[in-house]
Image: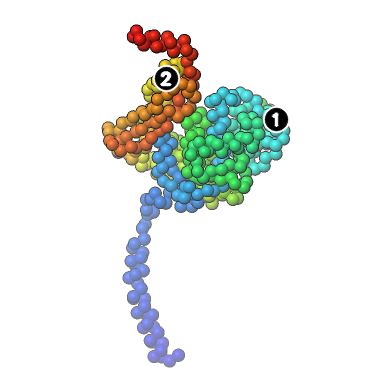
Amino acid sequence: MNRHCKRLIVFMCAALMVTLAPAAAGALEESPSKKAPVSQAELAPSARSAILMDQGSGTIIYEKNSHDRLPPASITKVMTMLLIMEALDEGVIKMTDKVTTSEYAASMGGSQIFLEPGEEMSVEEMLKGIALASGNDASVAMAEKIAGTEAEFVNMMNKRAKELGLKNTHFANCNGLPAENHYTSAHDIAVMSKELLKHAEITKYTGLYQDYLRKSSEKPFWLVNTNKLVRFYSGADGLKTGFTSEAKFCLTATANRDGLRVIAVVMGEPNTKTRNAEVSQMLDYTFAQYMNHSIFKKGDLMGTVKVEKGNVPEVSLTAKHNYSVLLKKGSTVKDIRHELQLAPLKAPVKVNEPIGKLIVYQGDQVLTEFAVDAPASVDKAGWWTLFKRSCSSLFS
C-alpha cells in the first residue's frame, strides 16, 4: 500500500469517529441512571398468564392473557379445598372426622404426605397436608371421603366451576397431576380463590409456614409450606403453589393489609424466584395504589326478607362475608351508597338460593354488584299457621 492510500484511510477513519461521537455521547446521556418506576404493563413480564384481583369486590386491577387455558398443576387444589370447606359448612363432614386412606389414594405420586393404605387421619390433618405440603394423596383421600370416589368428586368440581361461571376450566382429577383435558385460567383461579377466601378459616391452614403430622408417632412428618411468601411477605397468608414440567411454576397468592385483601395469580413462570418476585411486585403495586371501603362486615345485619307462606314470616339477612369496594387512594367516599334489591320470596326457600343483589354506587355510577343468597331454608307453613296469621292481620 503506498503512502497516499494510507493517508486517505486515516483521514476517513477520523472523519467517521467525529461523526459518530456525538451520537454515542447522546446515547450515554439518555440512559437513565436509576430504574424507572414499574408500570402496570411490567408487573408480571415473565408469566405466561397473570391476574390481580381485589378479593372484596372482585375488581380486576391487572391482567395478562388471563383467560388462556393452561395446565394449573397443584393450583387445582384450590377447588378441592373449596369443596372441603363447603362440605364442612353443610355438616357433611367435621374437622374431627377420621379419613381412611385407600390403596388408590396412597398410590399418588408427586407431592405427598406419604399416606399408607389403611392409615387414618382427621379431616383437619388432611387439610393441613393439602394446604401446606400440597399432598396429592391427601387430596384423593378427602375426595373419596366426601364423594365416595375421586371420579364423583371431580364431577362435583366441574359442577361447582360452572356455578361460579368459569368458562375456561375443566378438571380431570382433584390434585393437578398431568392429565388430558385438565385446564383452567388465571382468571378462573382468581375467582375460585375469591370464593375459597369467603371461608376465612382457610387461611388458618394456608397461612401456616410449618407444622407437623403424626406428631405423637414414632415417625413425625414435618410440613413446610410450599408458598414461601407466607413467611417473607408481610400480610401474606395463602393460597396455593403449583409446578409440573408442563405448567411450569404457578401461584395463587393472597395478602391482607389494612382491611384490603388482594389475590395475585401467575402461571407459567420460569422458576420460583421469578414467580415470587413478580407476585410480590403485583401485591406491592396494589397496596401502594388502592384502598378498601367497607359496605358491610361479616355478621352485620343487611336487612330482613319477607317470605310468603313460610313457616316464619321473614328472615334476617346477615352478611356472610365482608362486602367492600376498591378505590384509588385519596378517592372521596362521601357519595358512595348501596341498595339491596331482593326478589319476592315464596316458601319453600333453600339456604344459599339466589334471592337478589347488593348494588354499590358512587353517585349515579355502579361500582360493583354482589349476589345475595338466602340466609336460611324456610319451609312452607301449614294451613293452621297460615289461618292464624290471616286472623292476626285482620285484627291488627
Tell us which disc is closer to us: 1 or 2.
Answer: 2
Q: Residue 298 carries which label?
A: none
Q: Identify which amino acid the numbered label 1 is placed on.
A: Glu
Q: What element carries label 1?
A: loop
Q: Name the residue under label 2.
A: 308
Residue in the image at 50% along x and 36% along y: 163
Marks 1 and 2, Cα distance to the nearest angstrom?
51 Å
Q: How many marks?
A: 2
Residue in the image at 59% along x and 37% along y: 155
Visual colour scheme: rainbow
Q: Is residue 273 above or below residue 56?
A: below
| Of pointers 1 and 2, the one earlier in the residue sequence | 1
Residue 367 placed where, x, y %?
34, 37
Which residue is at the far top?
Answer: 395
In front of the other: 300 or 389: 389
> Does residue 295 appear to the left or right of 375 in the view shown?
left
Residue 17 placed where, x, y %?
36, 76
Residue 337, located in which quarter of the rendered image? top left
Residue in the image at 49% along x and 30% along y: 199
Marks 1/2 in contact by CB < 8 Å: the verdict is no
Q: Name the residue under label 1.
A: 119
Residue 306 placed where, x, y %?
40, 20
How crowded pointer 2 is (Cα within 10 Å; few <14, some 14-19, many 20+) is rated as some
Residue in the image at 38% along x and 9% along y: 392
Q: Report the quarter where the C terminus lies.
A: top left
